[in-house]
Amino acid sequence: MRVHRLSTVFLVLLLAISAAQTLAADIPRHDFPRVGAYEVLCGDFHMHTINSDGRLTTRERVEEAHSFGYDVIAITEHGTLRNYRTAKYIGESLGMVILPGFETGVHNNEHYVVLGVPPSYKPRDSHHWAKKWAKSKGGKTALYQDEMRDIAAVGGILFYAHPHRGFRSPTDWGIKQGVIGGIEVQNRYGHIDRGKGLEKFGDTWCYPFAFDWALKYNLALFANSDVHDPRKKGDQPITLVFVTSRTQGGVMEAIRTRRTLAWFNGMVWGREELLSALVEAAVTVKRATDGRLRIENRSPIRLKGTLPVTGTAIELPPYEEVALYGIGNSDPVVIKWENLWTSPKTNLESTFLVVSAHP
């Protein structure tokens, strides 16, 4: 009997190990090389569960995010943080960082996502903030300025979600007060809302004007899913966060200091200095003894560009190296990246010193 029980336990352990290995094999590779002092994390800071208007449970949503390769997430229900502790428990067991957050906003107008408040924080009048005191029903409805001040007082920060209402006074005031620190330049859920501010950029719908605002007003860029239903297979919007520590505090510090990039639909949008640093860490250019130019990509981003001197088009698959012939002996090598954007009208251009490589 004892032998039988031991055999059963051993079988259960084997099945558990096999299941864990299968799950790990399904997770897309998404690691980046370090960028100076920073580790690069893949984040999604806007999503929903059955605790508001989503269709998945908290556990299902967290495990789903993990299976798609996210390192850090925030589940942002409408006006509540009640499932944060559950999400944190599940996420941390998977090696993820979970931020507390919720979605709120001005009545019939702007939506904002709040990050980093204590789990005990009690949002007031979610999506019904009044713009003016006279419209706050004698003080019974929260004035947006009061709520933003309260959020800031407990360590929270807001970003402007799917900014189709434009740049109105609540957003302007929040930025000037240092409470609003970011903006979504892409919101996957927003593709169904094309009549309200979305613009076509290449073959995807997004908010190019929000990119301009981010540069003008010094806002962190976010690309989030705003997912309500189960995720569909394929590329997901990702906010790249450059952290000094893989912790809640590390992520919040990175957002506050605007160390984020928006990666979606094969493109990366961001400030030139941060985007340049990422490419410098991820790409190396070598010349073999036979004259071939070998370019290596150590990131999960499929990079596309041209060599302006020769007009040669290049494509660097994730974690691969390509060899180019007939490029000449120019050193350094300049690459203009077609899918890396430093503004809605400008692409990143990188200069690489060529190092020697074996054939």
Image (cartoon, rainbow, N blue to C red):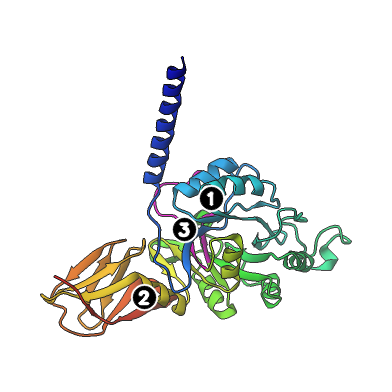
In the rendered image, which residue does mark 2 sit on?
280
Where residue 237 is drawn, which disc sits there? Answer: 3
Q: Position of residue 198 (x, y in %)?
A: 51, 63
Residue type beneath disc 1:
Val
Q: Residue at x 38, y 77 (%)?
A: 347
Q: Earlier in the sequence, mark 1 or mark 2?
A: 1
- Look at the picture and state if 141 lies above or below 327: above
Around disc 1, counting alpha carbons within 10 Å, would you say few (fewer than 14), some (14 to 19), or many (20 or more)?
many
**Residue 231 in magenta stretch:** yes
Around disc 2, counting alpha carbons within 10 Å, would you say few (fewer than 14), some (14 to 19), or many (20 or more)?
some
* Range of magenta residues: 222-243
In-image side of 107 versus 208 (left or right): right
From the viewer's side, name the closer residue of 183 and 327. Answer: 327
Residue type beneath disc 2:
Glu
Q: Position of residue 332 (x, y in %)?
A: 26, 84
**Residue 182 in magenta stretch:** no
Q: How many numbered marks have been drawn onto this rendered protein structure?
A: 3
Residue type beneath disc 3:
Pro
| Residue, far left | 290
Q: Position of residue 253 (x, y in %)?
A: 60, 69
